[in-house]
Amino acid sequence: MILQRRNRIIRRSAAIRAMVAETRLHPDDFILPVFITEGKDVVEAISSMPGYFRRSVNKTIEEVKELWSMGIKSVLLFIKCNDSLKDNTGRESWNPAGLMQQSIKAIKDAVPEMIVMTDVALDPYSEYGHDGIVDVQSGYILNDETVEALTKMSLSHAAAGADFIAPSDMMDGRIGVFRKALEENNYPNVGIMSYSAKYASCFYGPFRDALDSAPGFGDKKTYQMNYANRLEAINETLQDVEEGADIVMVKPAMAYLDIIREVRNAVTVPVSAYHVSGEYAMIKAAAERGWLDEDKAIIESLTAIKRAGADLIATYFAKDAVRLLQAS
C-alpha cells in the first residue's frame, strides 16, 4: 500500500514522540495547596485524601523548604480554624495574629522567594460552613456584606506578605473592590488570582473534610456556578479580568476541560485550573485497588489539563508529578 502521508512516523519512537510533543509539564506549572492547622509538630493525615496532611506552621515550613528544593515555587494556603473562633461575621479571618497571617509571615521569612497565594473565603471561619455571611432568617448568603468582610481579610493577607490573594467565594463584584482596596492601602504589587469559574461540584468533598468546612445547611448553589453552564463561565471570567484579576481560575479541572479551553480562548491573562480533592481521591482510590497505574494517571491527567489551556495547575499531585518528571 502506497500512502501520501503516514501519520505514525512521528509516533515511531520515544525520542520522536518527545520531539514533537505539543504539551509539556514543568515544575513551574504547579501550585501546591497546603493545609495548615494549630499547634506545634503536628502532622495529621486526611483520611479522604490518602498521602495528604494538615500540618502545623513549623511543619509547614519544613514542607515549603522541600518544595522549593524540588522546584515547586508556588503554594496556596488554607487554614483549619478552631471551632471556638468561628462565627457569622468572619472576623477571625482578618485577625493580624490569626493562623493564616502567622503562616504567611513564617513562610516568607523561611523561603522569601516562594510565591505565597492565600485562600480568600469565609467558609473556614463560618459557623455555618458557607463562603459568606448568612442571613439567618432566610438562609441566603449576603453578597455585599460578605465582600466587605473579605476585603478586610484580603488586606490582612497583603499586610502579612502574601504575593497573591485567591478569592474563592464567588460573590459578585468582589475583584474590583479588592483591587481598589489594595491600591488605596499601598499594596499595588499584590496580585489577584480569582476563582472566576468555580462550579458547585460534588468533587470538593475531601477538601471539606480536610478543613472541617462543609456547609451546615443547604448547599452552595446560590453562589457557585451551575455545572450545566458554559457561557456563564466566560461571562464571569471576563468580568473578573475587567475588574482587575491578574490570573483567572477554573475549578474543578478534569470534568471541566472544555471550560478551561473556552476561558483560555477568551482572555489574555494567565489561566489556572484547580485539580481538586475529589479528582485526587478518585485516582488514589483506583490506584489502591489496582485498577489503574497511579503514576501514569497523574501525568496523563495533568497533561490533559494543561493541553486544555491551563498555564498553571493547582494540584495535590504537584510533588508526585515533579518526581515523575525528573525521573523520566
Image: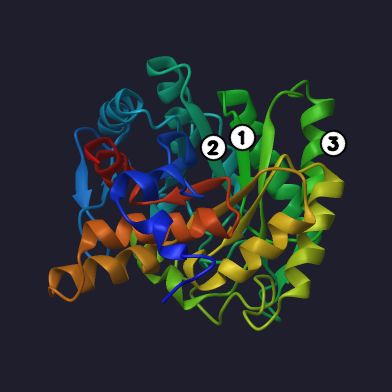
Q: Which residue is mark 2?
A: 117
Choose between 213 and 248: the one closer to the eye: 248
Q: Which residue is mark 1?
A: 164
- With 100 as the anchor, is 283 left or right in this view? left
Query: Mark 1 falls on what kind of element?
Result: strand
Query: Mark 2 falls on what kind of element?
Result: strand
Rendered image quadrant of residue 73: top left
Residue 46, percent from left and from top: 24, 58
Residues packed near mark 2 inside 10 Å, few (<14), some (14 to 19) or many (20 plus): many
- Marks 3, 2: nearer the viewer: 2
Residues packed near mark 3 inside 10 Å, few (<14), some (14 to 19) or many (20 plus): some
The mark nearer the N terminus, 1 or 3, is 1
The mark nearer the N terminus, 2 or 1, is 2
| x 51%, y 66%: residue | 129
What amino acid is at disc 3?
Lys
Q: CA distance from mark 2 to mark 1?
A: 5 Å
The mark nearer the N terminus, 3 or 2, is 2
What amino acid is at disc 1?
Phe
Residue 277 visible in this rendered orientation of the protein: yes
Choose between 53 and 155: the one closer to the eye: 53
Residue 65, percent from left and from top: 31, 24
Rendered image quadrant of residue 134: bottom right
Query: Mark 3 falls on what kind of element?
Result: helix
The numbered dot on residue 180 is 3
What amino acid is at disc 2?
Met
Q: Can you say which quadrant of the picture contains the C terminus?
A: top left
Residues packed near mark 1 inside 10 Å, few (<14), some (14 to 19) or many (20 plus): many
Q: Can you say which quadrant of the picture contains the N terminus?
A: bottom left
Residue 200, percent from left and from top: 58, 74
| x 80%, y 34%: residue | 181
